[in-house]
Amino acid sequence: MYVDQFKLSDRPFINGPDTGLFTPNDEFETAVSRISQVLLARDSVAVITGGPGVGKTTMVAAAVNRIGERVLAAYADMRLADPDLLFDMLVLSLGGDSGNGDRASSLHRLKTVIARHNEEQGRKITAVIDVSSLTIERAKRILQLAHMAGEPGCQLNIMLLGPHVLHKLLDTPGLIHLRQRVTFRHRVRPLSVAETESYIGEQLQQAGGQADRLLTHGTAIMVYRYVGGVPRLVNTMMDAVFSYAAAQGADTVTPQMVADVAQALGWRRLSSGSKSSGNRPQDMQHKKPAADSKRRQEEPSPLEQSVANERKTPPPAVKPA
């Protein structure tokens, strides 16, 4: 489709980390540079937060790509995984062999494989851990990594990816050992209207195309009205729109096509005064009664709940709605 219909050399919009990162502004470029510094450190901790699809993993991948073989990132997605699997996940990501699930032996294997990369290949290792929240068990495992990184002869940086609430959870007194190692915090925001238009143009150019040839006036703005500048949603929308245009035998994409595809996907336009949360289109965000919203804010986080249970004290009470 992209080659035959639109004369492109490659698929321009994919939902995966793109090492040829488009830098929309100085803030973004500065963040990638600071991430690079963390990757080259010895036992630093970084916290990068944002809604789904805004580019957290992409920023890390771009920094790793810029540095090259001197660094190696070990990825572990802990959003749904058992916290006890963290060490084995990192071992496997670094090319080692998993064990029988015993935490002590898993941690020993992790130390061994890190030392091999450090000493034999001269690489700095960073554990990139994606978490949706910091439960007490997840926090314990991450703290074990932080303590291990502080031991003589063991180099390991830690990079936590997750929602913005992660910054608040790190202020919990029990995480002081982790918080004291944090050298960089960054909140990734969605793209603006102008940045969204530039992003679409850049992706097309990398695939051998030109936005002014493939898109009619106002197409990028129409895309923004549905996705709010979230790169992953931009990719999803543009890929679907190009497929729609190809099915119609068109060689250009129009704003009306964007509207037609959005309707087929069940997406609605963002209201003019709203800001994108970086999570999903407006129509996918089910509205809740005000009382439910207030209740959510007053409920303790999983970490606070776990700490309260360990201390055998009741968690903060939920006020009646």
Image (tube, rainbow, N blue to C red):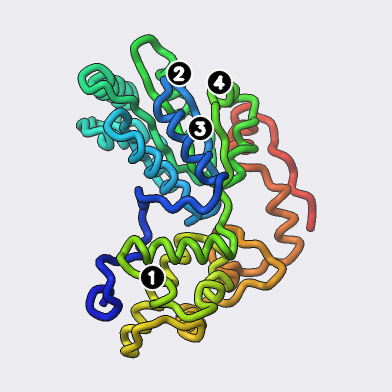
> Which sits earlier in the primary sequence, circle 4 or circle 1?
4
Q: Which quarter of the picture shows residue 288? A: bottom right
> Which sits earlier in the primary sequence, circle 4 or circle 3?
3
Towards the viewer: 292 or 21? 21
Q: Residue 76 carries which label?
A: none
Compared with 214, 294 (above or below) is: above
Residue extending farthest to the bottom is 248
In percent of width and height, residue 67 lies at 34, 34
How many numbered circles are shown? 4
Q: Which amino acid does label 4 sit on?
A: His
Mark 4 and mark 2 in contact (Cβ < 8 Å)? yes
> Which sits earlier in the primary sequence, circle 1 or circle 2?
2
Residue extending farthest to the right is 320
Q: Mark 4 points at which residue?
A: 177
> Which sits earlier in the primary sequence, circle 3 or circle 1?
3
Q: Which amino acid does label 1 sit on?
A: Gln
Mark 2 → mark 3, Cα distance in angstroms: 15 Å
Q: Mark 2 points at which residue?
A: 147
Towards the viewer: 25 or 1? 25
Disc 1 secondary structure class? loop
Can the viewer see residue 85?
no
Q: Which mark is residue 210?
A: 1
Q: Would you call the spot at circle 3 few (<14 residues within 10 Å), some (14-19), or many (20 or more)?
A: many
Camera-near label (4 vs 1) is: 1
Disc 2 secondary structure class? helix
Camera-near label (2 vs 3) is: 3
Q: Residue shown at 46%/78% (left/top)? A: 265
Mark 4 → mark 3, Cα distance in angstroms: 14 Å
Q: Mark 3 points at which residue?
A: 46
Q: Would you call the spot at circle 4 few (<14 residues within 10 Å), some (14-19), or many (20 or more)?
A: few
